[in-house]
Image (cartoon, rainbow, N blue to C red):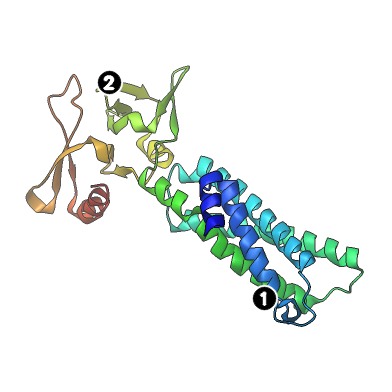
Amino acid sequence: MNIIKFLKENINFSNFWIRNGFNLLILSLVASHLADPQNSPLNDSYSFPWFSMLLSILIGSIVIVISLFNFRYFKGKYFVKKINTQVLLRFLFSTLGYISIAYIIFYLIIVKLVNEKYDLYGFLIGISISLLLSTIGIAVLFSKDIYKLHKLASIYGKLKVQQGGKITLINYIEIAFIYSENKIVYIVKTDGTSIVTDFTLNEVESEVSEQSFFRANRQAVVHARSIEQVQSIENGKLSVVLKPKISNKKVFQISISRYKKQEFMNWFEGKL
């Protein structure tokens, strides 16, 4: 208990490397003792399994580094736009692919160093177990971060808007809604100002986060923060009042068809 108290008071376990380094050390210690019955402390010829433990730490460190770099890549390029099953599976399988390549290289080097023969069965068992453990490890390492990104999608990104020869960067968090009028697409910011763009609405939709923005109809893409009022109207449609007000319009109001009504309500209620 004193050791645990000392560790909590003197080591910052909120740090990614310290936290996961400590977890990796404990897992490697346990795994190296369970891997071979001769490594059991109850065995009369017990000796501390330094080699297998160091090997476990090395492999685990490689897995963590690969996973972290791939996560950062996906966070910057994909997670900021949308987080769905397809993107998550792409992240997982690409990470496992990189880990497989690293495992093959590592296996060939180790076999060469110890002058052993290549064992296909042992290799397949080893890589299967490694990938299974890596999948569990990736889920444990990044599930919290992915959940936060899912809830706060779009906050970290910027939308590059080109209009004429001018480029403007707009933080996603500044965007209230986007609409098309007379074939011109406008971005309305939370302060009520609007920006003319060279985008089509389809192009804008592909750039912003599906978690935070919703394509309401052919004329508008809305953020949850822009919705002031939702009301059922005739023919099963919805009338949605948006904010902030635009200078030339008293109230900006859009309608959502009955075919998209349930999809919109599921999305909107998930933001409440």
Percent x, y of residue 181: 26, 29
Outermost residue to the top: 165
Q: Is mark 2 on a helix, strand or loop?
A: loop
Judge whether 35 appears above or below 69 on screen.
Answer: below
Can residue 90 be spotted in the picture? Answer: no
Percent x, y of residue 233: 8, 47
- Taking 86 as reference, is 72 left or right? right
* In-front residue for pair 235/158: 158
Q: Which residue is drawn at 54% across and 64% down?
A: 136
What type is the residue that disc 2 sits on? Answer: Thr
Can residue 48 be spotted in the picture? Answer: yes
Q: In which quarter of the image is residue 96?
A: bottom right
Q: How far apart are marks 1 and 2 (CA)?
A: 64 Å
Q: Which mark is residue 193?
A: 2
Percent x, y of residue 52: 76, 67
Disc 1: which residue: 34
- Taking 167 as reference, is 29 left or right? right
**Lower position in the chain sequence, tag 1 or tag 2:** 1
Q: Which residue is drawn at 47% across and 46% down?
A: 79
Q: Which residue is drawn at 57% across and 56% down?
A: 3
Judge whether 136 appears above or below 213 on screen.
Answer: below
What type is the residue that disc 1 sits on? Answer: Leu
Q: In which quarter of the image is residue 168?
A: top left
Q: Which mark is residue 173?
A: none
Q: Is mark 1 on a helix, strand or loop?
A: helix
Percent x, y of residue 35: 70, 75
Q: For the residue carrying disc 1, how many other residues have a C-alpha within 10 Å: few (<14), some (14-19), or many (20+)?
A: few
Outermost residue to the left: 234
